[in-house]
Image (cartoon, rainbow, N blue to C red):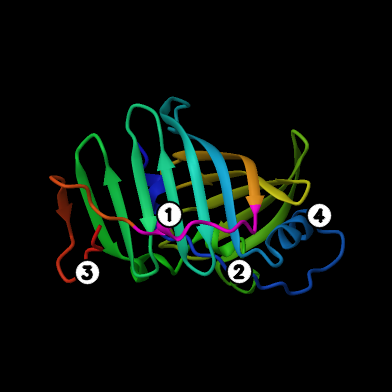
Amino acid sequence: MRCLLRKVVLMVCLAAATPAWPQDNPGREQLSRFANGMTSMQADFEQRVIRNDGVIEDQSDGKVWLQQPQLFRWEYGGDFPEIVVADGKQIWIYDEVLEQVTVKPQSEFSADSPLGLITDFERLDEQFEVREAGDLDGMVLLELRSKDAESDFERILLGLADDELRMMTLEDAFGIRTELNFSMLQRNLTLDTDLFRFVPPDGVDVIGALGFETPQP
């Protein structure tokens, strides 16, 4: 299942605030350099969802594109292909197997965004207790613990190397862990605007579209 990661995906936005951090904080320093001046990003990803008993519940891979300030697209491959697109006003989730599209207002998913917060440093300490968490496999680790009892995530672990985000692990209150590993990451590309535009294919069910404009082909 992709429900935990979907909560991340549906709340993504980009920003590029760069306040000064105290010295001797390698995780924060790499995170700052990663986000400084970033307007767009493209990467491959691998994802695993692991239950608290260690069983892998879901495993998939795909591509992600992000464009400042609040556009994104995630494409999942494998046996259950899925596309998630934010066009700045609404979120489109297309499940190809179910032939179903769910559309929701994007404003519902902007308040507590782990991927958004890592590039919006002014909000980072407002939402999380942040601490350096050592090293792992050549990455410096940064641990985020939510200050909000209602947050979907109790703990987020970021792994950075060479001033790039390489890994993100998210844990919820039930001990379910979602692991994301990023590769082939590129910043500040000129991205095709059609990446952030979604038109429901003919014949699919569209849920939650009432009150929204549906883009025309």
- Label 4 sits on what residue type? Pro
Q: Say which label, 3 or 1, has the lower sequence index.
A: 1
Mark 2 and mark 3: span between their CA atoms?
A: 30 Å
Residue that mark 2 sits on: 120
Is residue 144 in sight in this rendering? yes
Q: Which quadrant holds the N terminus?
A: top left
- Pointer 3 local density, CA inside 10 Å: few below 14, some 14–19, many at least 20: few
Going from N to C along the chain, the mark reached first, 2 or 4, is 4
* Real-space Cα separation, disc 3 to disc 1, in angstroms: 18 Å
* Residue 52, image quadrant: top left
Range drawn in magenta: 187-197
Which amino acid, mark 3?
Glu
Q: Which residue is mark 1?
A: 195
Horizontal side of residue 109 vs 114, given as left or right: left
Residue at image point 16% right, 55% down: 207
Q: Is residue 173 visible?
A: no
Is 153 on the left-hand or right-hand side of 130? left
Q: Which residue is mark 3?
A: 213
Mark 3 and mark 4 in contact (Cβ < 8 Å)? no
Find the residue positioned furthest to the front.
217
Q: Position of residue 29 (x, y in %)?
A: 78, 60
Which quarter of the rendered picture does the C terminus lie within?
bottom left
